[in-house]
Image: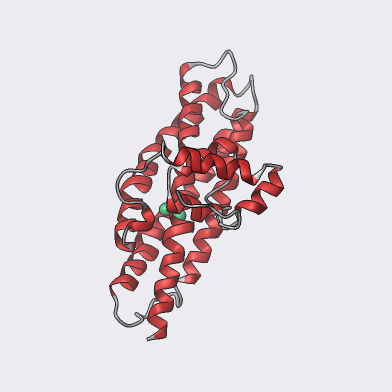
Amino acid sequence: MTTISPEVTIGELVAERPSRSRIFEQLGIDYCCGGKKPLSEVCAKKGLDPAMILERLEREAEALLDTGPTPAQMTLSQLAVHIESTHHAYLRNELPRLAKMAQRVAKVHGDKDQRLLMLSATFGVFMHELESHMAKEGHVLFPAIRALEAAETLPSLPFGSVANPIHCMEAEHDGAGEALERMRSLTDGYTPPEWACNTYRALLDGLHELELDMHQHVHKENNVLFPRAKEREMQLTAF
Ligand SMILES: [Fe+2]
Ligand SMILES: [Fe+2]
């Protein structure tokens, strides 16, 4: 069993063993957009004991054995394909479905709870921004990352350094994270009121699942794909 230092970042901990994300989800610790922070700093802020978390990570490590290659073990091209075929494909199906449900619930129950109108509006903007974000990754950034991996000398990219679009994508991830937090708070943590109909309940279920998927998705990009792409560019620059 390896001994984990409290100075390791949350993102590194999840990159090394993805199933640890479940423990961080349960503790309300942000491991995707906030993944660059060391465990010790996050614990101090949340009033948690790092020794307790380290013990839990080590104790549960055996029970949460990950199967298949982790994102950190994939090549950059494999990881980009994996992100597109799982997380982007999931969002393309799920976003329009949830948008329709949010509109319907807002229309039928908005007079009873005005927050449902805000929820539907927030979701609409979130969906629109995320669709444009995925198009930029799929058509511009991921092909550039594949080119960096395949190249033997530094390729000329239309946007200069790969760090430029990565910086934009990370800022957009922060925006998406804020929208998800807003939706969580507008729905009291995805808790349906007693009078909620089935569509309302299914919407909250779907939103909760979306939040979990987005955390995984953003973690794989912010903490694995992007740093490794920048590292690859640095290696090629050194030649
Ligand atoms: Fe993505
Ligand atoms: Fe992204």
Q: How many marks?
A: 0
Q: Is residue 132 visible?
A: no
Q: Quadrant of the C terminus?
A: bottom left
Q: Is 34 situated left or right of 155 in this image?
A: right
Q: Percent x, y for residue 121?
A: 57, 38
Ligand 2: image quarter? bottom left
Q: Is residue 32 visible?
A: yes
Residue sticking out furthest to the front: 1
Residue sticking out furthest to the top: 195
Q: Percent x, y for residue 15?
A: 44, 53
Q: Percent x, y for residue 24?
A: 54, 41
Q: Percent x, y for residue 183?
A: 58, 36
**Which residue is nearer to you in this view: 117 or 179?**
179
Picture residue at 49% right of the left edge, 26% below the top? 104
Residue sticking out furthest to the bottom: 239
Picture quadrant where residue 95 is located: top left
Picture quadrant where residue 29 is located: top right
Would you place residue 160 above or below residue 109 in this image? Answer: below
**Which residue is nearer to you in this view: 46 or 160?**
46
Would you place residue 233 above or below residue 55 in this image? Answer: below
Q: Is 109 situated left or right of 130 in this image?
A: right
Picture residue at 40% right of the left edge, 78% below the top? 235
Colouring chosen for the image of the structure: secondary structure
